[in-house]
Image (cartoon, helix red, strand yellow):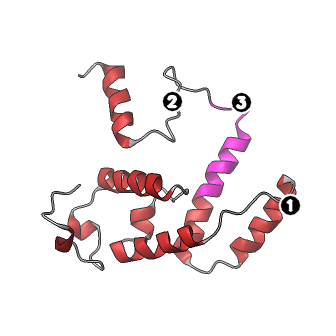
Amino acid sequence: MLGHGSPDAIGAHQAFKEMGFDSLAAVELYDRLGALAGRPLPSTLVFNFPTPARIAGRLATVLAAPAAPATGSAEDEIARFEAAVQATSDGSERQMIADRLEKIISTLRQSTPSAPSASGEDIDTVSVDRLLDIIDEEFETT
């Protein structure tokens, strides 16, 4: 992704910023890891977990936890979630939760769900490459 000759050129405790990561590279890594993990990851992954070792630790935690089955009503799930949040002490994880909750609240407050794009793709779930293709198509830059 950044043109390093081999994985050995990257230190596990070296900050991504020191390796030349910019916002686009961070989003690309987030997309790739999310697809491989098959689980939701925070969009601020590289900023919340700024080294390969920290991301590996987070991924180990995420992948080790079994997917929780729905147990009841939305109210029951919110109560269960609230208890889990109160037990979380990691500041970066709490910030990730707060950011995600803000997105959920924003969606709930919208009077109507957002309409899909003309192509039928959801901008929140398309890859960076596809998003750039959509922009190119929209502005006919290709």
Identified by mark 2, the residue type is Glu
Residue at 45% in and 38% down: 126
In percent of width and height, residue 67 lies at 66, 62
Identified by mark 1, the residue type is Asp
Q: Which stretch did the figure color magenta?
A: 100-114
CA–CA distance in space, label 3 to label 2: 18 Å
Q: Is residue 137 above or below residue 25?
A: above
Task: Give residue 112's mark.
Answer: 3
Secondary structure at numbered mark 1: helix
Q: Which secondary structure type mostly characterizes the magenta part of the structure? A: helix
Residue at 38% in and 28% down: 134
N-terminal of the pair, mark 2 or mark 1, is 1
CA–CA distance in space, label 1 to label 3: 25 Å
- Residue 99 included in the magenta stretch of the image: no
Residue at 31% in and 50% down: 24
- Tally the numbered discs: 3
- Residue 112 included in the magenta stretch of the image: yes
In this rendering, the label closer to the viewer, 1 or 3: 1
Q: Evaluate whether residue 134 shows in this view.
A: yes
138 vs 84, left or right, is left
In percent of width and height, residue 5 lies at 12, 63
113 vs 30, left or right, is right
Q: Provide the residue designation for mark 2.
A: 121
Residue at 41% in and 41% down: 127
For the residue pair 25 and 66, the one nearer the viewer reads as: 66
N-terminal of the pair, mark 3 or mark 2, is 3
